[in-house]
Amino acid sequence: MGSTLAITPFSASISCGTTPATFTYSGYQSDTSALPSFMSISSTTGSISVTSASTTGNYTIVVYGTLSNQQTTTASFSVTGYGLPTFTASISSVTLSVGQTKTTVLPATSDPNTLWVTVATPVQQGTSSLPAFTAYTTASKTLTYAPTLFSQVGSYTISVTISNVYISNTYTFSVVVQNSAPVFASATTTSVTVSVS
């Protein structure tokens, strides 16, 4: 999960010749140290890519452009890293049988930047809704599972995304619906008396 900051490409005037001025880009932090491990700069466009936002903080990045004749120019950019919002506990997988009802209460959320965290309505992974036997109560952040059909037997991956105003984080967990155990009616024992003459 990451993002890219596009920059206005550097330009240069050529006093002679028709070959356009083409810059090769690199970069470093303003204190001349190397870029953070989660940042990179495109050598052809100069765009700054943040490959992971797990590290928070403010960074001043210097983009360094070099022409083929070794002339150079620079530009500075301020980049702020925002950490991922998280749940404060893991979400356990759920196993139940047809005819049973179980629930999952989503954990509380936390944000390293003390930003407001929004919890999106969970969905079955790869779809835009929950399985038919699952209901979600927004106020209590509770999922309720109540399969009633044998056609609902199977394994389902539930996805829930939490986000602040800058970045989101997605969690997944499994819900497994099994065949319910067969229930036999109690047998009735009848006593028979046989008379032998």
Image (cartoon, rainbow, N blue to C red):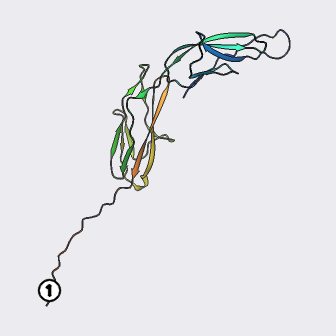
In front here: 151 or 68? 68
Image quadrant for the N terminus? top right
Count of numbered circles in the view: 1
Q: Quadrant of residue 180?
A: bottom left
In front here: 30 or 44? 30
Mark 1 surroundings: few (<14), some (14-19) or many (≥20) residues within 10 A: few
- Amino acid type of the residue tagged 1 in the rendering: Ser
Residue 57 in the image, given as x and y percentages of width and height: 50, 16
The residue located at (80%, 16%) in the rendering is 20
Residue 174 in the image, given as x and y percentages of width and height: 43, 43
Image quadrant for the C terminus? bottom left
Q: Residue furthest right?
A: 17
Residue 95 in the image, given as x and y percentages of width and height: 37, 47
Residue 131 in the image, given as x and y percentages of width and height: 43, 45
Q: Residue furthest bottom?
A: 197
**Residue identifier under label 1:** 195
Circle 1 SS class: loop
Q: Quadrant of residue 184?
A: bottom left
Residue 126 appears left or right of 42: left
Where 74 sits versus 102, above or below?
above
Q: Residue furthest front?
A: 33
